[in-house]
Image: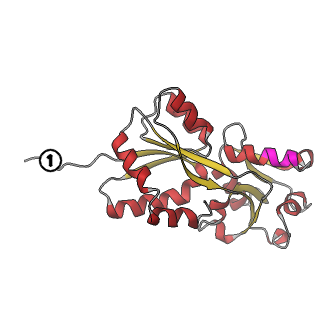
Amino acid sequence: MASPVHAAPLSVACAANFTSAMKELATLYGKTHSTKVNCTFGSTGMLYGQIINGAPYDLFLAADEKRPAMLHEQGLSEVPAQYARGNVVVWSNRKELSSMPNWKEVVLSPDCTRIGMANPKTAPYGQKVEAVLTAEGIRETVTPKLAFGKSVGTSFQYAYSGAANAAFVAQSQALSVEGCTGKYWLVPEAEPVIQSACILSNGNTMLATEFLNWLHTAAAREVINGYGYE
């Protein structure tokens, strides 16, 4: 008897900030397509390192423009394209911080002694936070409070679990099911995070192209916009 034929899955390396949106998108995609979407989540820097060392991904959804551009320059991917534009926020589930009027009041509050933040060396959201703390002249004051995580996902977990009083995270995380248990403050001084995707040359380019094109459909954009991305 012939064995059943299973369609090859799509392997996606996805930046941690896009986790909740991507999980919902993968489920939605599966309702109208036969392709299963397998995701690996992590910091953009970590995923980039895996890709240049031969990790078998088909598509890379980064949290910046830099790494996809570098992969293209090295001949490892097709031309990158923007798929989302994210915002930096401060999030907390602590009642003593909930009445604060803005993000600076939160992080400077004496009640806020530990703040989660993504490692700026590997995470684009961490880089944006580092830049805004410097520009606002509060970096030296806030730095002793910072607890660095390998990704913005780790940063959110610090605050969500209670290991930190608050955290610098992506707006998408603040709008997730877990994020709705707390409060968030936009950091308007931080530059938006332009997030690019690239189809990896050694992967299944046909499946990756199909999914990336689908991300620009009305159904997909509704999900993406629902998590605060533009």
Tag 1: amino acid: Ser
Answer few, some or many: residues within 10 Å of disc 1's Cα (few below 14, many 20 plus, some between 14 and 19).
few
Above or below: residue 24 compared with residue 199: below
Q: Where does the image place residue 174, in percent across and percent down from the top left?
A: 66, 64
For the point 55% across and 59% down, which residue is it? 20
Q: Where does the image place residue 105, in percent across and percent down from the top left?
A: 88, 63
Front one among 83 and 173: 83
Front one among 163 and 210: 210
For the residue labelled by badge 1, is the local secondary structure a helix, a strand or a loop?
loop
> Image quadrant of residue 124?
top right
Above or below: residue 1 compared with residue 177: above
Q: Is residue 121 visible?
A: yes
For the point 39% across and 60% down, which residue is it? 29
> Image quadrant of residue 122?
top right
Secondary structure mostly seen in the magenta stretch: helix
Q: Which residues are magenta?
A: 130-135
For the point 42% across and 52% down, which residue is it? 213
Q: Is residue 153 left or right of residue 127?
A: left
For the point 77% across and 52% down, which residue is it? 190
Q: Is residue 74 left or right of residue 167?
A: left
Colour scheme of this structure image? secondary structure
Q: Does the magenta portion include 210?
A: no
Q: Does the magenta portion include 132?
A: yes
Q: Is residue 175 left or right of residue 142?
A: left
Residue corresponding to mark 1: 3
Q: Where does the image place residue 79, in percent across and percent down from the top left?
A: 49, 37
